[in-house]
DNA sequence: AGATAGATGATAACGATTATCGTTATGTCA
DNA sequence: TGACATAACGATAATCGTTATCATCTATCT
């Protein structure tokens, strides 16, 4: 049985406290900064446990996996390739069309991930000069 | 200047010869099987070169990057989590809705990647018993 | 031929993640 | 309460895809 230990609760609290998208390292550092240092392996195990119970969500970016608050409504992500800013968005129609497309190909869908890359408003401004 | 060497041409030929989605290792082995062994670093460099010139496309899956024939029409992918089969699909409306959603968030879109996970027809059949 | 620019290959390095393993904490049952 | 089972923890080794390094090699141009 999987347990929600003190450390895992602390990880969950950190993640729930904002809309940030954390990687394992950042969380280890945040824990350390909060005075309760934690082994990196424990962070990974804790995150896997939390995710398997639906208490947090994750997105797999090219390089690393990032964790975020669980959200009842599924959403996808826009990543600024300049500053790393991640914006969330959800689009009912896109979801439905995806389901339809999968069905058409004979796929039983279990999940999906849509990541859009580009420049956020800030960075687009900065680079147009 | 980037050159299209004999080895790179051979990689391109292999990729163009099918709809398969190759990872670097598989390509190195295919080259080796074809009698022209190649260093793995050269494979990576060659693939990067081919991709930068738009001669091939790639998708970044959770674990590794896979390369495929360049296609004028952008398409996305459905991956069977059971057998690894990759199915392609393109959906004009989804693309347009993505653009609109990005614009709404102030993003200048440079690319995106939509990967859907699930069971292909075969594997869905096999597991329902 | 000599010079220059880029490609190649062996291999070391890197970075994220997972496995290992001895230790520690927690929960349960007698 | 004590003993035992179960899972978590932490340090660290291992894994794996990918990139960097660096000493050749190969074309191409003058």
Image (spheres, coloured by chain):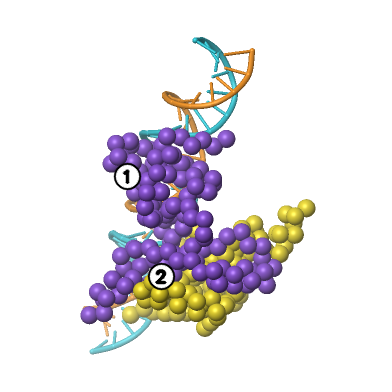
Chain colours: A purple, B yellow, C orange, D cyan
- Which of B32/A74 is in front? A74
Q: How far is mark 2 from mark 1, CA to CA?
A: 27 Å
Which mark is on residue A67?
Answer: none
Up/down of A30 relative to B105, above or below: above
**Circles 2 and 1 on the same subunit:** yes
Return the x and y of residue B83 as percentages of the image width and height: 65, 59
Return the x and y of residue D21 as percentages of the image width and height: 28, 59
Q: Secondary structure at mark 2?
A: strand
Relative placement, left or right, of B25 versus B2 is right
Return the x and y of residue C28 as percentages of the image width and height: 59, 23
Residue A82 falls in which quadrant of the image? bottom left
Q: In percent of the image, x 34 and y 63: which residue is there?
A: A85
- Which of A42/A49 is in front? A49
Residue underneath mark 2 = A117
Q: In percent of the image, x 57 and y 78: which residue is there?
A: B91
Asked if the residue at tag 1 contacts the one at tag 2, i.e. Cβ–Cβ closer than 8 Å, the answer is: no
Residue underneath mark 1 = A30
Which chain is indicated by disc 2? A
Which chain is indicated by disc 1? A
Q: In percent of the image, x 49 and y 44: which residue is there?
A: A50
Specify whether residue B42 is in view: no
Q: Secondary structure at mark 1?
A: helix
- Which of A57/B52 is in front? A57
Specify whether residue B108 is in view: yes
Number of other residues with Cα within 10 Å of mark 2, as a class: few under 14, some 14 to 19, many 20 or more: many
């Amino acid at each position: 049985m999987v347990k929600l230990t003190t450390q895992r609760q602390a990880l969950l609290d950190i993640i729930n406290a904002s809309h940030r998208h954390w990687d394992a390292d950042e969380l280890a550092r945040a824990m350390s900064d909060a005075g309760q240092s934690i082994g990196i392996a424990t962070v990974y195990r804790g995150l896997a446990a939390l995710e398997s119970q639906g208490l947090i969500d994750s997105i797999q970016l090219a390089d690393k996996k990032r964790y975020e608050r669980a959200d009842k409504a599924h959403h996808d992500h826009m990543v600024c390739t300049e500053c790393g800013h991640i914006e969330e968005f959800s689009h009912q129609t896109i979801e439905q069309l995806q389901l339809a497309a999968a069905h058409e190909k004979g796929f039983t869908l279990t999940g999906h991930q849509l990541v859009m890359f580009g420049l956020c408003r800030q960075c687009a401004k900065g680079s147009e000069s």
